Amino acid sequence: MGHPQSGDAMAAALLNDTAELVNDDRDTHGDAVENQQHIADAWTWYLRGQGLLDDGDAVMGDDVAALMTLVKLSRHAVGDRDMDHMRDVAGYAGIGGACMVDRGAAPADELARGAYESAHLGEREDTPPESSTMADRIDDDTDDGATADELYALVTDAVRAGAYGDAVGCLENADEAKRQLARLASERASAEAAE
């Protein structure tokens, strides 16, 4: 409010600062990807020991980065609204992407936006119609008894179309989501019993 920089410029300043921190030679954490994978190996060992992770499954470095993002968001929600939490979230997002490339889950050229958009966001046949919002489509399909797969597809369409607010809005109310999931599970169980 009344700040001389635009919102975009302020966001870019935070991201640039985060990039400098991640790439800082004085970092005491070591290489970011190596560190995340080391943590992933430790978490895999622990979760297997607790019987929470099957022997064939493993936590990956990008999983660690995603979960650390949740830690920072929780601190932001429960503790002080500290700018450093937002900086850490941005940093972990970048580190998670680097971990994906390192383990071969994404090509290195997708670290650049243009390559990613060309590969994933080009002309799509499944782009939703512009005549209705994603929230309307999800509300309509939910009322009509959409399956979990159909709801997932609608939320995915919303994200692909850049309608993040619609996607989040559909998932925002935890109680409603629980009721819908219970209804869907009941319908699926009834359908399986009828077969």
Image (spheres, helix red, strand yellow):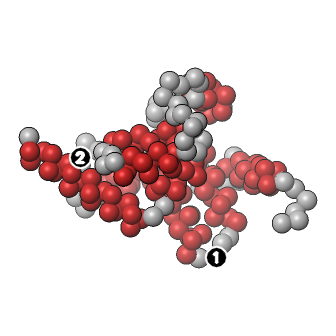
The residue depicted at 68 percent of the width and 64 percent of the height is 84
Report the number of discs: 2
Mark positioned earlier in the residue sequence (2 or 1): 2
Viewer-proximal residue, 121 or 80? 121
Left or right: residue 105 versus residue 98 is left
Residue 152, x across and y down, in percent: 39, 44
The residue depicted at 27 percent of the width and 59 percent of the height is 182
In the picture, which quadrant includes the N terminus? bottom right
Crowd tier of the residue under label 1, counting other residues whose Cα lies within 10 Å: few below 14, some 14–19, many 20 or above: few
Mark 1: secondary structure: loop
Residue 116, x across and y down, in percent: 60, 29
Q: Amino acid at mark 2?
A: Asp
The residue depicted at 33 percent of the width and 42 percent of the height is 149
Q: Nearer the viewer, mark 2 or mark 1?
A: 1
Tell me whether the residue at label 2 lies in contact with that at label 1, contact meaning CB atoms closer than 8 angstroms: no
In the picture, which quadrant includes the C terminus? top left
Left or right: residue 112 versus residue 146 is right
CA gap between label 2 and label 1 equals 39 Å
Q: Amino acid at mark 1?
A: Asp
Viewer-proximal residue, 161 or 111? 161
Identify the residue under disc 2: 55
Question: Relative to 120, is 158 above or below?
Answer: below
Identify the residue under disc 1: 80
